[in-house]
Image (cartoon, coloured by chain):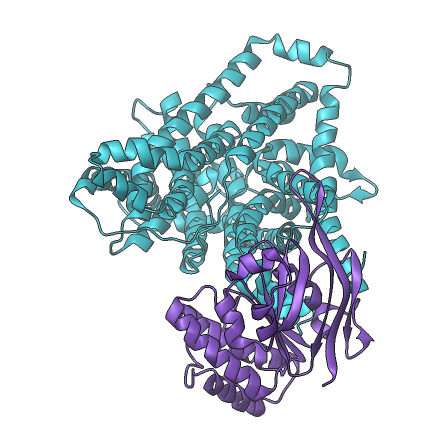
Chain colours: A cyan, B purple
Amino acid sequence: MTRARTSPGIVIATVLGVAVPVAFLAVFFAWPVAAMVGRGFADGLGGFGEVFSRPRTIRLIGFTLGQAALASGICVVLGLPVAHVLYRLRFRGRGLLRALVILPFVLPTVVVGVAFRTLLRDTPLDGTFAAILLALVFFNVAVVVRTVGSAWEGLDPRQEDAARVLGASPARVFATITLPRLGPSIAAASSIVFLFCATAFGVVLVLGGTKFGTIETEIYLLTTQFLDLRAASVLSVTQLVIVVALLAVVGRVRGSTQRRVTAARRPRRTDAPAIAAAALITAALAVPVLALVERSLRTSTGYGFDNFALLSGTGSRNALVVPVWVALGNSLGTAVQATVLAVGIGLVASLVLSRSPRSLLARRALGALDGALLLPLGISAVTVGFGFLITLNQPPFDLRSSPILVPIAQALVALPLVVRTVLPVLKSIDPRLRESAAVLGATPWRVLRDVDLSIVARPVLAASGFAFAVALGEFGATSFLARPDRPTLPVVIYRLIGLPGGDNFGMAIAASVVLAVVTVAVIALVERLRVDTVGAF
Amino acid sequence: MTTALETRGLTVSYLRDKGRPALAIDDVSLTLDAGEVLAILGPSGSGKSTLLRSIAGLEVLDAGRVLWEGEDITSLPVHKRGFALMFQDGQLFTHRSVASNVAYALQIARMPQLEQRERVAELLELVGLAGFGDRRVTELSGGEQQRVALARALAAKPRLLMLDEPLSSLDRELRERLGRDLRRILVETGTTAMFVTHDQGEAVLVADRIGIMMDSRLVQLGSTAEVLEAPATAAVQRFLGR
């Protein structure tokens, strides 16, 4: 076999491109999770028998799966009309609406929890199952809208036209033509939503109180309150099994993202029901946010900025170690580091994953890496956080007291989102475009710069903003890893609502508004880049 | 006439879906003189494009050598061969303007800015798109995009210009006009060229010599008249419809 020579630099770069993401995932994901799992099996399967014989465990697993199934069902029902209106119709202000709909998804979980508590306070819904369900739907409806919407936008409308000409009513066209064609994207979106709900932590912790809990909040309670590490790891393993099974489903139904047509059209009269539903749902999404802002401005005498002024202090009864503004500074600094890590590793991994090597073995290996990169999306952040504590506390990785641990954990959470944003764009580049550049005399490095990196520049920027927002709001792993003297904003907010009385609740709400404003500002910038792979799965 | 390109026994295989290897091109040997235009004509799936890609250095060869002016370039990397390859659908860089697409090879060669601008203007003039430099390539029609692709390929004065079905995506009338323009441009610039097509008319219009590929093999190679008047086999005769 002869071929044009590959320079040693390219060979080394390819090897590094595979090795760096793999090593990162191995040390900071696989190892901690494996250590956690190992504890569950420490004395054989006995631990499992004991933990599963507790009625509480069975109730928790039932609740976790039940609320996730219900929430994803509701998200699909509510998401479809919105997806239709925002992606299939063309009208003024569509871009703004699309941006507004994704907001709940990027709001920090703690903020959403606080917003719903504020909204439902003194109503019969406070502290109920319905409250948790509402918050989860609020959070995840965007996933359905974005994922199904971008698939819908790419469907060739001529098939629908053909059915209409043959005499099908609009409802019949939808049921017999549109819905089946949207099937894969609906399946993908609902399984992702199920995944997010099944591993929901912040929202359930804030809204569920002692009455309701998921596997995830139970792991947290078992480790931090009851110090029952064995039971915690048994639950981690259980969750791991559920998540891996779900991800296998997601991988199977996730269709190709390549598309060319944009099928948006002007609204017709038959769209009226969908438009009305979409308007109602979008308005409903704004309610919790508005309630949060309103409450943050309320003072004992009327309206004012008193709650915000309090943020330079440490709360009533010295609830906090540092002022809230310092925590915001910590959050921003940590999120920048996490973004650099996630985008660096995510970009390298995406570049490698976008190639289709000749050998079957290499192609299978890339497929496996692709799947592994999606894993952190579903694995409990609490498991990862706890895993860090039990593995990274000895040489060669004695990082327990190092401030780098928090950004690493946040990067892990953001990594799948970076890859999902960048990889589809890289994969849609025709390989012959690279070949054109090479034949014209561009070295492999130059091809990488002039073709791949130029095309992917905007998506990478968008992914950076997205990763930053996610890192900023990350609560599950951060709550484990942040040192008491260096808390992030979500950790501080949770601490404040845990110690009500005095000014603390007002401060928690004001801090939530600050966190939401920063997140929204970042996401608004991302939306301006108009990269449609952001937030679509 | 001096021999520019020579291939000796080029063979490329690919893996079928079930993992069994099949030959894409089988033992192809040919020569091409400097300044000559050769058309490779054959039905789809006969291996024409693979032949071009192997000469460009984009394929892994199972056997065979590629020589340029007698020098073995088989293991020379793609970007050092000084060739150009134009694809059926142009493959323009959509994130660059028309002018910066055309200037791409010149930028790589570090030609001074001023000269680049002159050369780009000259090339756009040559392909009939004078003044189109600042347009976005996505605003152009299919025929205009192919003209830009041709200008981009010619920019660095390639030793060999390869064209893969350059006119196939265009409608009939445009194809004939662009075909004639292509012939004129190749002759005017004295470019050695090799192009692949499944359309006899196109081959006759543009090329000096025609090679016929069928079932992965080069079955006949000769002047346009020779091939049309005396098909080597019954299958070639059927393909040519004579």
Q: Would residue A535 be found to the left or right of residue B237 on screen? A: left
Q: Position of residue A51 (x, y in %)?
A: 64, 12
Name the residue furthest left: A269
**Label total for image:** 0
Which residue shows up at 38% across the image and 32% down it? Answer: A137
Q: Position of residue A232 (x, y in %)?
A: 65, 22
Please determine whether, in this image, residue A239 is positioned above or below residue A367. above
Quarter of the image for residue A185 reads top left
Q: Position of residue A315 (x, y in %)?
A: 48, 42
User: In front: A156, or A481?
Assistant: A156
Q: Position of residue B116 (x, y in %)?
A: 56, 87
User: In front: A171, or A226?
Assistant: A171
User: In front: A119, or A42?
Assistant: A42
- The answer, for residue A231, to whether it is visible in the render is yes
Q: Would residue A166 be found to the left or right of residue A504 on screen? A: left
Please determine whether, in this image, residue A266 is positioned above or below residue B242. above
- The answer, for residue A132, to whether it is visible in the render is no
The quadrant the N terminus of chain A occupies is bottom right
Please determine whether, in this image, residue A453 is positioned above or below residue A157. below
Quarter of the image for residue B7 reads bottom right
Which residue shows up at 64% across the image and 55% down it? Answer: A344
Which residue shows up at 77% across the image and 14% down it? Answer: A44
Q: Would residue A442 be found to the left or right of residue A490 on screen? A: right
User: In front: A441, or B144?
Assistant: B144
